[in-house]
């Protein structure tokens, strides 16, 4: 008998077909996530699942799904999964690192450039018929080239963002829990500093830390107060890394000049004040959303699932402890 697996939400047809070659697939083909009770019902008799970051897999879910051996998340972040609970229950957790780094860095830069140069605001101005001709003093933004770029978290994505910054002749500072190898610092032209110095010296601060308890509200009132009043904050990591209410306060009090966000604390909700602010560019969590990259991510998740259920070590196992 073939093993039963769940695909929890709409993904690419070719990935469903790939999974169907090996497994008896229960496919929830909607892009509306299953409610928690429905997710449990669908997972109950399954040995594995391909999940998205809007599916919450916690101990309450796992306790009712005793057959499950692997949760294969289609995302590099896995804060939607209680990894400790999975490890305790001998459930493998996998993610999709690497394949989305450049795509995420591109979107980070799209946010950075569009916030600095007021592209979204200008687009709305033109479309609404307000453009009456070229004016020297209209839509004055901030230069990006030759400015200071501060990267919080010089991991795979942070490095790609820095590499792009180098192309703009920026002065690159970074902070992280561990210092990068000299060869990485050298190739990116990036200087290691502590978080305070990074915040107070950078013209653009871009966040690339994973969401852990230690990085929850990594940016809040105190950190925003350190930033230059002309600085711009970019977040394409996880919403909860930034205290969104503190961000609203900082923008209202003009402690910083602008913000570009792809992620939010309570997705899909956004602090209402942000929606009214012209110096804020908002994207709906699309950093990895190119067709090529999302297909690679979904394929990788299927490959992790296949490995895990056929007795092999999944290539992107997050919780090594599960194998002990
Ligand atoms: C997207 O947000 C991801 O973590 O892959």
Image: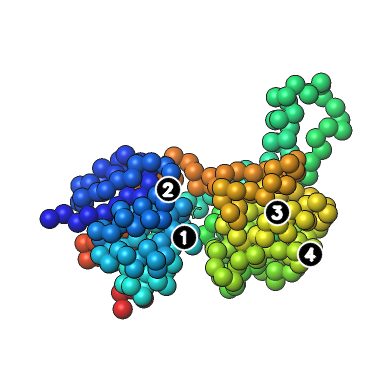
Q: Give the residue drawn at x 32%, y 39%.
A: 13
Q: Which mark is residue 33?
A: 2
Q: Which mark is residue 228?
A: none
**Which residue, as the protein is rendered here, is positioned at the far bottom?**
324
User: Going from the N terminus, do you reach mark 3 or mark 4 first?
Assistant: 4
User: Going from the N terminus, do you reach mark 4 or mark 1 first?
Assistant: 1
Q: Secondary structure at mark 1?
A: loop
Q: Are marks 2 and 3 in contact (CB under 8 Å)?
A: no
* Distance between the alpha carbons at the discs numbered 2 and 3: 30 Å
Pointer 4 residue: 226
Q: Is residue 103 above or below residue 138?
A: below
Pointer 3 residue: 233
**Which residue, as the protein is rendered here, is positioned at the far front?**
37
* Distance between the alpha carbons at the discs numbered 4 and 1: 31 Å
Determine whether the beta carbon of the residue marked 1 sits less than 8 angstroms from the nearest atom of ligand 1.
Answer: no
Q: Are marks 1 and 3 in contact (CB under 8 Å)?
A: no
User: Going from the N terminus, do you reach mark 2 or mark 3 first?
Assistant: 2
* Distance between the alpha carbons at the discs numbered 2 and 4: 39 Å
**Can you see residue 183?**
no
Pointer 1 residue: 80
User: Going from the N terminus, do you reach mark 1 or mark 2 first?
Assistant: 2
């Amino acid at each position: 008998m073939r093993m039963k697996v769940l695909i929890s939400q709409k993904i690419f047809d070719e990935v469903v077909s790939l999974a169907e070659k090996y497994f008896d697939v229960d496919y929830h083909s909607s892009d509306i996530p299953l409610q928690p009770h429905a997710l449990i019902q669908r997972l109950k008799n399954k040995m594995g699942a391909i999940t998205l970051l809007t599916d919450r897999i916690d101990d309450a879910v796992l306790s009712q799904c005793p057959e499950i051996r692997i949760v294969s998340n289609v995302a590099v972040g896995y804060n939607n999964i209680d990894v400790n609970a999975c490890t305790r229950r001998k459930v493998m957790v996998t993610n999709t690192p690497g394949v989305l780094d450049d795509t995420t860095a591109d979107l980070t830069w799209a946010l950075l450039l569009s916030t600095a140069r007021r592209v979204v605001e200008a687009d709305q101005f033109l479309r609404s018929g307000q453009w009456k001709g070229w004016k020297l003093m209209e839509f004055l933004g901030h230069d990006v080239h030759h400015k200071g770029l501060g990267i919080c978290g010089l991991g795979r994505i942070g490095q790609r963002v820095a590499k792009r910054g180098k192309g703009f002749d920026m002065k690159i500072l970074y902070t992280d829990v561990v210092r990068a190898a000299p060869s990485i610092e050298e190739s990116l032209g990036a200087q290691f500093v502590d978080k305070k110095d990074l915040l107070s010296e950078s013209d653009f601060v871009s966040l690339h830390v994973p969401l852990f308890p230690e990085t929850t509200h990594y940016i809040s009132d105190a950190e925003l107060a350190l930033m230059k009043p002309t600085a711009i904050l970019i977040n394409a990591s996880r919403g909860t890394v930034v205290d969104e209410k503190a961000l609203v306060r900082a923008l209202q009090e003009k402690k910083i000049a602008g913000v570009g966000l792809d992620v939010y604390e309570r997705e899909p909700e956004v602090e209402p004040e942000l929606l009214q602010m012209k110096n804020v560019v908002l994207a709906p969590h699309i950093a990895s959303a190119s067709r090529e990259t999302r297909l690679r991510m979904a394929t990788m998740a299927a490959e992790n699932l296949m490995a895990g259920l056929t007795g092999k070590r999944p290539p992107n196992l997050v919780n090594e402890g599960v194998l002990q």
